[in-house]
Image (tube, rainbow, N blue to C red):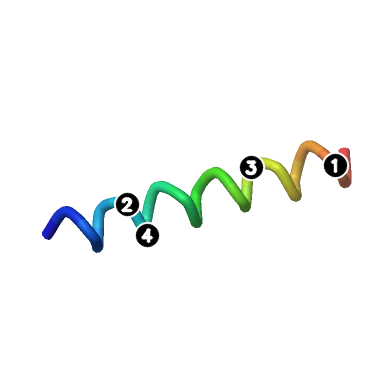
């Protein structure tokens, strides 16, 4: 559903942010 898609998108963005911070 839409909510699940939003949750997946925010999780992906959070992971990318963590990787960029660690890099």
> Foreground mark, 3 or 2?
2
For marks 4 and 1, the one nearer the N-term is 4
Q: CA distance from mark 3 to mark 1?
A: 9 Å
Q: Say the numbered circle drawn on residue 6.
A: 2
Residue under label 3, please give it: 16
User: Residue at position x 61%, y 51% from top?
Assistant: 14
Q: CA distance from mark 4 to mark 1?
A: 21 Å
Residue under label 1, please give it: 21
For marks 3 and 1, the one nearer the N-term is 3
For marks 4 and 3, the one nearer the N-term is 4
How busy is the neighbourhood of tag 3: few (under 14 within 10 Å), some, or many (20 plus)?
A: few
> Foreground mark, 4 or 1?
4
Marks 2,4: beta carbons within 8 A = yes
User: Residue at position x 78%, y 37% from top?
Assistant: 20
Q: Is residue 12 left or right of residue 7?
A: right
Under circle 2, the secondary element is helix
Residue 12: x %, y % from top left: 50, 49
């Amino acid at each position: 559903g839409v909510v699940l898609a939003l949750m997946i998108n925010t999780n992906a963005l959070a992971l990318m942010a963590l990787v960029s911070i660690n890099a």
